[in-house]
Amino acid sequence: MTNKILTLKEYFQKYDESVNDPKKFWGSIAESHLWHKKWDSVVDWYFGGKDAPNVKWFVNAKLNITENIFERNLPQRENQIAIIWEPNDPKQKEIKITYGELFQKVKQFANALKKIGAKKGDRIAIYLPMVIELPIAVLACARIGAIHSVVFAGFSANSLSDRINDAQSNIVITSDGVNRGAKRICLKSIVDDALKTCPTIKNSIVLKHTEEKINFESPRDIWWHDLIKDVSLENKAEVMDSEDTLFILYTSGSTGKPKGVLHTVAGYMVYAEYTFKNVFQYNEGDIFWCTADIGWVTGHTYIVYGPLLTGATSVMYEGIPTFPDAGRFWETIDKYKVTQFYTAPTAIRALIAQGSEWVTKHKLDSLKVLGTVGEPINEEAWKWYHDLVGKGNCPIVDTWWQTETGGILISPLAGITPTKPSFATLPLPGIQPVIVDPDGKILEGNNVKGNLCIKYPWPGILRTTYGDHQRCFNTYFATYKGLYFTGDGAKRDEEGYYRILGRVDDVINVSGHRIGTAEVEDAINQHPKVHESAVVGYPHEIKGQGIYAFVTCEKLTDEEKKNIENEIKNTILKEIGAFAKPDLIQLVSGLPKTRSGKIMRRILRKIGEGDATNLGDISTLLDPNVVEEIINGAKVQIKK
Ligand code: WT7
């Protein structure tokens, strides 16, 4: 396979080349892609100016990413399985779709989209369960040059409508319902709710999946199966500029509403394929399985684009890890002889809690590589994964990256980079991380700890936040001049290995879901009886971090007090989605605030950690007494 590193020595060589001459390095990798016209220059960029970031890769080149999946890989992969779809219900039959078949379906749906007027540059919202039509819809958008904006199907109607309105989407693609373990959720009714406040939507395309009865509003609503009837299978891909937008994906930050992280065609394509091949060391005949949802970036890059660009065969799973029982992952690995398995630490911890017998009764002898993503993995979970699932034979790739980075930035190359539990290890070729102190001074050498930044662009870096470039600058480039700031803390140990220490901003990571504390607070404050709230993350055995909300309310009767917690949780359900429900809610008479009115989250974070010994100086608080009250009523065990 082209562009695949095979030894540690080669990794170090490539790494040096990529730093010494990034243009030559990435230019040579991009040679293996299919272009209508090649680039005039490999990269033009600056991180420093006021309108930063300004990043262009493969300048003025022309291409279509789906031609790199299909036309480039066909005809030799015509009959090779592209995706094996494993249904939620194990009694239902799987679907195996070849590259040839997938191509037909993508062209057909691309033509169907055109039939209702979709065109290059439109923002198309996709709100679907993990069904085979989800990657088909994504790729059909890319085929015609429309910008896909996939919204995870666990988001509420309000969150969906916020995303549709921010992107001014004209079409939404959804289904009647979704199967999640033993539960069935009527997705279409959530969309109906959302669309009450989405004036830009002209059509919603509805896939029949769970077959439940839904409300159907013609001519706005169109069945997927009706739309593709009599549609031609011939389709010429739209020729795109390298820097045309491929997709937007919304993600949470420390302030305000989620922002639309924007990725462009060529750079993202080159980066997705390169990182997929190298990190997972994919070989012909391997079966790759990433358990993420396509609603998050992990699914975009390592279910859809990375594997399909590479011409890989991968598994896509509709359901959840514990349905019908805690052996589902391991059973499925045996069923399809999965070779590379990529999941989140939170899933591993949840399965550890169910007992080892679920794992040991399966063979798991096809596995060669294990991966983790989304949050730091603790040593205990790492060891269990390594010893029990991998039988001590499979390297673990702890992959660190973000929605904004498009693909993996720091990770071992499977079987090549020596691993160390809880370390993401070394940067991939082309990635130049630096660790800075609070003043932005770059800390040279090893054995340093601080904030993680990247000083040179890579092809997969975000280009802007949709509709608000200033916000992109403020979030990522204003903190340290000339550097991309990740929001994560990190240390570099004596060997030069990176260990990610978690977010240093007001973002929390709950079961690998990135949630802004401000977003949760805004949602809680929607409850009519709530005055104010402050939300922090606290250590949670399974989820990594749990959500701890401190809330002040108007005077409540005893009856109201009993119900308020549930009511607050329901408010979150309505405003964001079930995954953002607080684990702990503490009613308090006041929040710890400075005299200027700023909430001292630092103090609440300490309390959430169960540590009241070291709260720092609280004398500057408006009302220092509330701290004592909060400690006494804390919902976690406090050591004083
Ligand atoms: C944040 C990004 C990357 C795709 C899924 C999440 C945390 C991610 C790791 C890791 C420690 C990690 C970081 C990062 N994170 N991977 N291997 N070790 N932390 O994407 O939702 O954009 O979240 O996830 O804090 O900033 P995301």
Image (tube, helix red, strand yellow):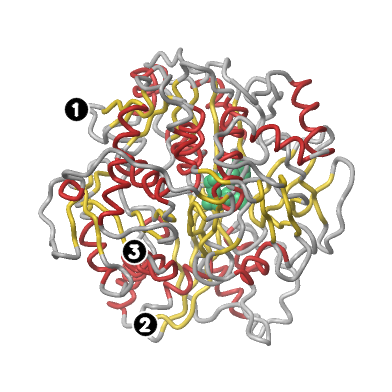
**Tag in front: 1 or 2:** 1
Q: Amino acid at mark 1?
A: Lys
| Picture coordinates of residue 505, whole percent (x, y) | 64, 62
Q: Amino acid at mark 3?
A: Leu
Residue furthest left in the image: 213
Other residues around mark 3 within 10 Å, as few (<14) / some (14–19) / many (≥20): many
Q: State the image quarter where residue 66 is shown.
A: top left
In the rendered view, tell whether residue 374 sits above or below residue 68: below
**Tag in front: 3 or 1:** 1
Q: Does the CB distance between marks 3 and 2 fall below 8 Å?
A: no
Give SS at disc 1. Answer: loop
User: Which comes sooner in the sequence, label 3 or label 1?
Assistant: 1
In the rendered view, tell whether residue 413 sits above or below residue 149: above
Q: To which residue does mark 1 refer?
A: 91
Give SS at disc 3. Answer: helix
Q: To which residue does mark 3 refer?
A: 573
The residue closer to the viewer here, 440 or 12, is: 12
Q: Amino acid at mark 2?
A: Lys
Other residues around mark 2 within 10 Å, as few (<14) / some (14–19) / many (≥20): some
- The Cα atoms of the two marked residues, 3 and 2, are separated by 17 Å
Q: To which residue does mark 2 refer?
A: 529
* 395 displayed left or right of 448: left
Q: Does the CB distance between marks 1 and 2 fall below 8 Å?
A: no
Q: State the image quarter where residue 231 is shown.
A: top left
Residue at the image position 22 percent from the left and 58 percent from the top: 188
| Picture coordinates of residue 623, whole percent (x, y) | 63, 84
Residue furthest right in the image: 445
